[in-house]
Amino acid sequence: MPPGTPAPEFTLAREDGSEFTRSDLEGRTTVLVFYPFAFSPVCTDQLNLYEEVLDELRPRGATMYGVSCDARWSQAASREQLGVTIEQLSDFEPKGETCRAFGVYHPGGFPQR
């Protein structure tokens, strides 16, 4: 989506199980990074690269979140193993609903980049 495009209505799960919705984005500059799978080599590289640019985003008031269809526990374990601070949001149940709303859901059951 181009910058400034209003996000569709959606609900994702935070690592602690609480909901993250479109209202959490209002009035904030946010980058949602969709990635296919926790623990996959390419996605691991992707999240590490994004972690490196966080210091450039924060002074601009931007917040980045990682979004995948993995379960919350899998995302948390992957984030901890990588040592990244990017908060992860799960589109596990109902699987891919938010990814579909953003137009990034692959028929194979995962978000496209």
Image (cartoon, rainbow, N blue to C red):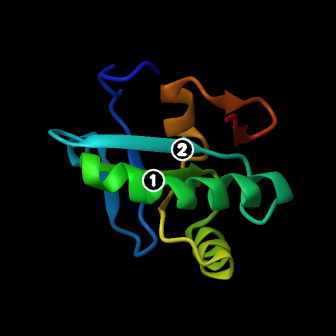
Mark 1 lies on a secondary structure that is strand
Quadrant, the C terminus:
top right
Coordinates of residue 92 in the picture (x, y in percent): 59, 54
Seen in the image, is 82 located left or right of residue 20?
right
- Residue in view at x 63 percent, y 51 percent: 69
Q: Are marks 1 and 2 in contact (CB under 8 Å)?
A: yes
The crowding category of the residue bearing disc 1, from other C-alpha atoms within 10 Å (few below 14, some 14 to 19, many at least 20), is some
Mark 1 or mark 2: which comes first in sequence? 2
Asked where in the image residue 100 lies, by quadrant, the reply is top right
Q: Nearer the viewer, residue 3 or 17?
A: 3
- Residue in view at x 75 percent, y 40 percent: 109
Q: Is residue 41 above or below residue 68?
A: below
Q: Is residue 8 above or below residue 75?
A: above
Q: Which label was assigned to residue 65?
A: 1
- Which residue in the structure is indicated by mark 2? 33
Mark 2 lies on a secondary structure that is strand
Residue kind at label 1, given as amino acid type: Tyr
Q: Which label was assigned to residue 86?
A: none
Coordinates of residue 38 in the picture (x, y in percent): 72, 62
Coordinates of residue 64 in the picture (x, y in percent): 42, 51
Q: Residue furthest left?
A: 27
- Residue in view at x 57 percent, y 53 percent: 50
Q: CA distance from mark 1 to mark 2?
A: 6 Å
Residue kind at label 2, given as amino acid type: Val
Q: Nearer the viewer, residue 77 or 3?
A: 3
Seen in the image, is 57 located left or right of residue 82?
left
Q: Is residue 113 above or below residue 11?
A: above
The crowding category of the residue bearing disc 2, from other C-alpha atoms within 10 Å (few below 14, some 14 to 19, many at least 20), is some
